[in-house]
Image: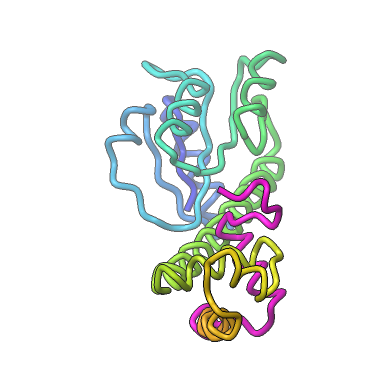
Amino acid sequence: MVFIVEDDVSMRRSLTNLFKQVGLNAVTFGSAREMLQSKLPDVVSCLVLDVRLPGVSGLDFQSELAKLNIKIPVIFITGHGDIPMSVRAMKGGAVDFLTKPFRDQELLDAVLAAAEQDRKRRSAEQIVTHLRSLFEALSPREQEVMKLVATGLMNKQIAAELGLAEITVKIYRGHVMKKMRARSLAELITMAATLGFRANRTEQT
């Protein structure tokens, strides 16, 4: 899905036709506010955004999206671009900054790159969500054991840390491996890192 925010009606129509020709669905808006007030489908997508818009400018809209934690990749288009604009856009995370008139293929390449970026982000977030649900299903003690395993401690050290017998820690660790569906210790540590548990104990929160 390609969202287009552009106040020029003829430009919106031209972009919509271009995307249709390559099998991409497009939804158009005449302003940033119009887009914000719409219910957007939760699908892999990107935003083709004009810099100069009525009301909120494209660059300010990019900042507003970031504040709202809306992570849609942005491609800027403008007929009045300059270096400071492009620098601000790219620092804000824009995928590309195209000056009109641009070649159709330039825009299509940018859109495909942005869609792939959004697809990867969504996939990564789904993995984190799944791992978090598995972690939250662990008992409080199992969660403690998993966090300590992630710091690189051995069973004996974890036992001393928690005031448990080493055999008890082994049992908890086995439960953690099974419930987290980890096939190896290395995979469990990777899962812990994905959830934000750091391997360095001095940095553990």
Residue depicted at 49% across the width and 82% down the height: 179
Of the pair 13 and 51, the residue shown nearer to us: 51
Q: Position of residue 170 (x, y in %)?
A: 59, 83
Range covered by the magenta-colored residues: 178-205
Above or below for 54 versus 1: above
Question: Hey, which quadrant is residue 182 in on the image?
Answer: bottom right
x and y percent of residue 22 in the render? 59, 57
Going by the image, does 204 lie left or right of 7? Answer: right
User: Is 201 part of what is drawn in magenta?
Assistant: yes
In reply to whether residue 192 is colored magenta, the answer given is: yes
Q: Residue at x 57, y 58 (%)?
A: 119
Above or below, 9 against 18 in this view is above
Q: Is the residue 79 above or below the residue 140 in the image?
A: above
Provide residue 172's location: percent of width, then percent of height.
52, 81
Query: Could you say which quadrant of the image residue 95 lies in?
Result: top right
In the picture shown, does residue 26 fall above or below 184?
Answer: above
- What x and y, as percent, mark residue 62? 50, 28
Q: Is residue 55 left or right of residue 97?
A: left
